Image (tube, grey):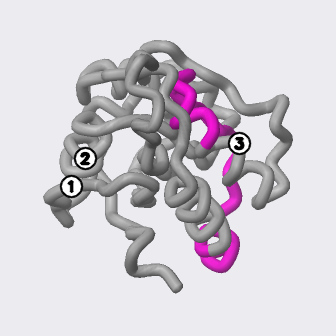
């Protein structure tokens, strides 16, 4: 069994409208939500073996905040350009290339791809994975290359505004 945790980037700032989408940073609410989600992931006992992030500033910053709080080594955070603005198929392609030594992937990225991917992989459907929302899915497979035909069950769903 493999576990995939999809984490959408935190709320981004529009304070500098001249910045391209890729370069937008987190706003303070996004930072705070990342801390809250990290605390919940720790409470749930989820132990990542790989952090894989879009290199977009807001996604990578979300990954860094959560990694720091979970004592995951920052130098082990991998980035993959194909996660940025990815479709479900592109996300599946990225995941299918992950080394099988990794049992639990934390994937950091963007909508609409993340909501659509969560809905493809599990029965419980989401209308929208909000910013800094996380959904964990346990997949009935032993090889990441099987992700394109995998289906699993939702382990948890974290919505920042529902967290204390």
Q: Which of marks 2 and 1 is nearer the N terminus?
A: 2
**Highlighted range, magenta:** 40-61
Examine the rendering and report whether any part of residue 156 can be seen.
no
How far from the left and from the top, in percent, is residue 88? 25, 29
User: Left or right: 130 with respect to 77?
Assistant: left
Instruction: Residue 66: say if magenta.
Output: no
Q: Earlier in the sequence, mark 1 or mark 3?
A: 3
In this rendered view, identify the residue nearer to me: 76 or 96: 76
In this rendered view, identify the residue nearer to me: 89 or 12: 12
How far from the left and from the top, in percent, is residue 54? 51, 26
Examine the rendering and report whether any part of residue 74 can be seen.
yes
| Residue at x-position 31% and y-position 41% | 114
Label 3 element class: helix
Label 1 element class: loop
How far from the left and from the top, in percent, is residue 76? 79, 31
Q: Find the distance from the CA under tag 2 to the CA under tag 1.
A: 6 Å
User: Where, by quadrant of the figure, is residue 141 drawn?
Assistant: top left
Q: Is the Cβ of the residue at disc 2 closer than 8 Å to that at disc 1?
A: yes
Q: Mark 1 points at which residue?
A: 128
Q: Which mark is residue 115?
A: 2
Q: Name the residue under label 3.
A: 64
């Amino acid at each position: 069994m493999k576990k995939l945790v999809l984490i959408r980037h935190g709320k981004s700032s529009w304070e500098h409208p001249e910045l391209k989408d890729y370069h937008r940073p987190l706003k303070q609410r996004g930072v705070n939500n990342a801390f809250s989600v990290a605390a919940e992931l720790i409470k749930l006992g989820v132990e990542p073996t790989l952090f894989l992030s879009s290199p977009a500033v807001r996604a990578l910053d979300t990954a860094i905040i959560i990694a720091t709080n979970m004592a995951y080594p920052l130098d082990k955070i991998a980035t993959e350009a194909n996660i940025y603005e990815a479709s479900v198929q592109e996300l599946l392609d990225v995941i299918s290339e992950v080394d099988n030594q990794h049992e639990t992937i934390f994937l950091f990225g963007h909508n609409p791809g993340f909501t659509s991917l969560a809905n493809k992989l599990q029965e419980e459907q989401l209308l929208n994975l909000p910013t800094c929302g996380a959904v964990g899915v346990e997949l009935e497979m032993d090889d990441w290359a099987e992700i394109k035909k995998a289906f699993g069950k939702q382990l948890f769903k974290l919505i920042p505004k529902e967290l204390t």
